[in-house]
Structure formats: structure tokens, C-alpha cells
Amino acid sequence: MARIEEGDIKDKEKEVDLLGEIAVSANNQGKSIPRKRDYRQRAHCNPLSNGKWEDLPTAPDSFREDAHFESAFLDKLRMEKKGEKEAKITFADIGCGFGGLLVRLSPLFPKELIIGMEIRAQVSEYVRERALALRKEHPGEYQNISGLRTNSMKFLPNYFQRGQLKKLFFLFPDPHFKRSKRRRRIIQTALIAEYAFCLREGGILYTQTDVEDVGDWMKEKLDMHPLFRPMTEEELNSDVCVELLRRGTPTEEGQKVKRNSGSTWLHCYVRVHGNPRY
């Protein structure tokens, strides 16, 4: 198992395999109030359509973290991270679905603010309600995750400053099979420049899909971009998130593929030094 560099459990009596089964799985909410059947919505949504977006920040400085995370927890993070004036989001799951990855990452990286970004209104509301319910069920835990509704293909730079993010996830994105609709895919040459802008140097971009054609598409686009390089085998083996994704358990889609004995294509890239504008 990959070595966990963050969120290590110091008390030996509490040592557990955080990459294995946890108290709250990707699908089971325990006694949490939100139920998926109450938040169902169409699986596909056109990201190129012009919709109404409430509370859309005009710039990263106008985005309020305290609208998603408790103020007391943010103050605690600021005190622990000396030299930082405010606690900022550092992990983003684009197209987070029902928030399975957020739940799995929370105990692994308790000092990182993690946001799930989802374009579907009902599903994004479910993620927020799920995070709030988990905080009530497990006092002191899951304080660092939340979800919001937005169109990441259009508005990602509205939320994040240059070099703000450490990790960016694109897991099981909509494949948009038809050739005429491929411009709707989340990994596009023009959009990769925005992802590079938001990621700090050394930050990691993760992609995973169960559609080989889509996996090849994302790999090709990222291979061609000068601000990203593929992770080496050594880096992959030492990355706790890669180990988690390889197990196929953190997301609802990943669990579905695993149950059906399907295959997934995982490609991970490191943000490298490049044009000073980025």
C-alpha cells in the first residue's frame, strides 16, 4: 500500500487502513438524512448551454469559503498553517457526482479543504447535504469537504487563484460519444491551460474513465500540453490517491465498474514549470 504522507494517525491503537473500508462508504450514508432517490436528475447535462448561476463569484477573492466550511474549522486551519492569512481550497473534484471521492479523501487529508464541483443542481445539493449530515454524525470529522453547483468548463478561474490547487480530479467524466458533441468533453486543449493556471507547480491532475476511447482522448490532450508531464511509475506507486483510485472504491462509478468486473484507464499528470503567465 502506498505510504500516506498526510493525515497519518499517530495513535497506534487507532491505526487503520484508510484506503480500505471506512465508516462511511461511497454509497452508504449510514443514518445521514439525504437519500439519493430524492436527488435524482438526468445523468447528462450540456456544459455549453447558457444557464443561470446563482452566487457565481466574479473573481477568486469574492468566493467565500465560509459559505461551505465552518468558520471555527477555517480559523483552526489558519492557526495550524502559519504564514497563511486565510484557509484556501486546495483539492477540487470536477464533476464530483454524489461525492464519494470527497468522503474518502476527507480522513486522508484532514488539513486540506476539498470541494466537489457539479453542474447538476439536484446532485450538487445532495453533496452539500451529505457533508453537513456527516459532520453531525461524526463530530470533528468531515469538516473539510463540501460541494457546490457550477460549470467548471466556463467558470473554474472564478473560484481559484493562480497556483492555488494541489490536486485536481476528473473521474469518469461524461464521454460524449458522438463526434459532434466531443467539444463538450471536460478535457480539451484550451481548458487544460486553465487547469494549469489553477494548479501550483508540482500539483497533480488525475483522470480516470471506464471508456477506453475517452481515456486515450484525455491522455493525448495532456501529453501534448507543455505544462504537464505524465507521472513516473515511482511517483504513481508512492501517491496515496493513485492507490485509492486503483482500488476502484472511492467513487460510485468506480464501484459500479468494479462490481461488473470492468476496466478503467487511469492517467495522472504533474504540473510543471512553464510560461510565467501560468
Image: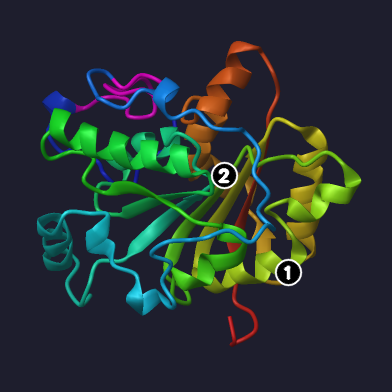
Q: Nearer the viewer, mark 1 or mark 2?
A: 1
Q: Quadrant of the C terminus?
A: bottom right
Point out the stretch of residues depicted in magenta. Answer: 15-29
Question: Which residue is painted at 38% across and 52% down in the image?
Answer: 115
Placement of 112 over or under 133, stated as above or below: below
Q: Residue furthest bottom?
A: 276
Whether residue 63 sits left or right of residue 10 in the image: it is right
Residue 77: in sight, yes or no? yes
Q: Quadrant of residue 155?
A: bottom right
Q: Nearer the viewer, residue 68 or 162?
A: 68
Numbered label attached to residue 233: none
What kind of element bears circle 2? helix
Q: Residue furthest top?
A: 260
Relative image position of residue 31 (x, y in whole percent): 22, 18
Q: Quadrant of the N terminus?
A: top left
Q: Residues within 10 Å of mark 2 (few under 14, many from 20)?
A: some
The residue wearing badge 1 is: 190
Look at label 1 and name its amino acid.
Ala
Q: Is residue 224 magenta-colored?
A: no
Question: Which residue is painted at 44% across and 77% down in the image?
Answer: 58
Disc 1 to disc 2, how far (Cα)? 26 Å
Question: Which residue is painted at 68% across and 40% down in the image?
Answer: 174
Relative image position of residue 157 (x, y in whole percent): 51, 72
Question: Which residue is painted at 75% across and 41% down in the image?
Answer: 215
Q: Nearer the viewer, residue 190 or 108?
A: 190
- What coloring was used for the rendering? rainbow
Q: Residues within 10 Å of mark 1 (few under 14, many from 20)?
A: few
Relative image position of residue 212 (x, y in whole percent): 79, 34
Numbered label attached to residue 236: 2
Report the number of numbered marks.
Answer: 2
Q: Nearer the viewer, residue 166 or 5?
A: 166
Q: Quadrant of residue 160?
A: bottom left
